[in-house]
Image (spheres, coloured by chain):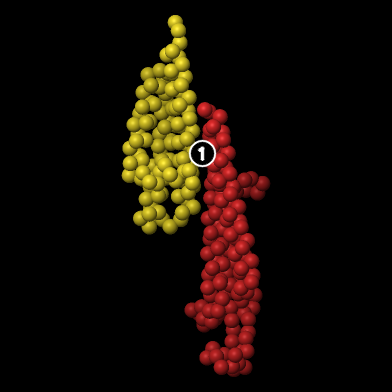
Chain colours: A red, B yellow
Amino acid sequence: MAVNSVGPLDIAVSGLKAQGRSMEVISSNVANSRTNNAGNGQPYRRLEAVLKSDSKPGEVGTVSLADVLPDKSDFYRILDPGSPNSDSQGYVSMPNVDLPIEMMNLQIASRAYQANAAVLKRYQQMVDTSLELLR
Amino acid sequence: MINLSPTSPSMPIAPKPLQPAGQEAKPAQVSGSGDFGKIIDKYIENVDGQQQSSQTSIQDLLSGKNADINSVVAEVAKADMSFKLLVGVRNKVIEAYRQTMQMQI
């Protein structure tokens, strides 16, 4: 039995890990959706998780988080002349985070996480079925 | 769910009963045929190593050294599956031994 090699078990667990990391990125986006100053005087810039396969093309393999890259779209500009952060025209720059989009991404990530957990569970059941034949 | 029960509650005791169980199956094979005994021996070592590493990963998780529960799940599931296979093979071998001893000569 190929328990040591990269099997369905390792692949499913790598999927769990990768989806967990992308959920981390989404939670950072949601938490910072109103952050005016991300330490550099600029509003928080939305981040996106980039997943990559660890195997060559056409081969089965595990997945991992390749990078966390910033979203290049423009910041939102909101008219709020009373704000201490407003510019000379009374506009305030806000992070380029859209909460509905983040909720969609969160749903996708959590469904993918569940799917990986289901694969892991089903594989264990398959191994158990095979071992039943020994009896 | 099945995989967590044999390892997690009996954390300090688990490696010890495994050793005698391994030793118990081993000499019977070694005295019989050397080749098969060696293979079984190697497999028991393999399973034991996986049990130990799942043990350490659980300890790392509980002591806060490692926060990643997914790798613990992977280690425990692997150790569980290979241990179940070992037990299945052992039962089969002992059954074969009993049948041989009951043979009328």
Query: What residue appears at the point 49 percent right and 33 percent down from the top-left corner?
Result: B85
Count every numbered label the image shows and give the total: 1
Q: Which residue, as the protein is rendered here, is positioned at the far top?
A: B105
Query: What residue appears at the point 36 percent right and 40 percent down from the top-left corner?
Result: B14
User: What's under tag 1, amino acid-wise?
Assistant: Val
Q: Is residue A62 left or right of residue B78?
A: right
Q: Is residue B86 above or below residue A94?
A: above
Q: Quadrant of residue A99?
A: bottom right
Q: Is residue B52 above or below residue A80?
A: above
Q: Where does the image place residue B36, in percent across and percent down from the top left? A: 45, 22
Q: Which residue, as the protein is rendered here, is positioned at the far right?
A: A58
Q: Where does the image place residue B76, in percent across and percent down from the top left? A: 45, 45
Q: Where does the image place residue B9, in percent across and percent down from the top left? A: 38, 46
Query: What residue appears at the point 59 percent right and 47 percent down from the top-left corner?
Result: A119
**Toward the viewer: B34 or B64?**
B64
The chain holding disc 1 is A
The residue that disc 1 covers is A3
The 10 Å Cα crowd at callout 1, few under 14, some 14 to 19, many 20 or more, is some
* Dot 1: element: loop
Q: Quadrant of residue B20?
A: top left
Query: What residue appears at the point 52 percent right and 91 percent down from the top-left corner?
Result: A84
Q: Is residue A69 visible?
A: no
Q: Is residue B41 visible?
A: yes
Q: Is residue B30 above or below residue A96?
A: above
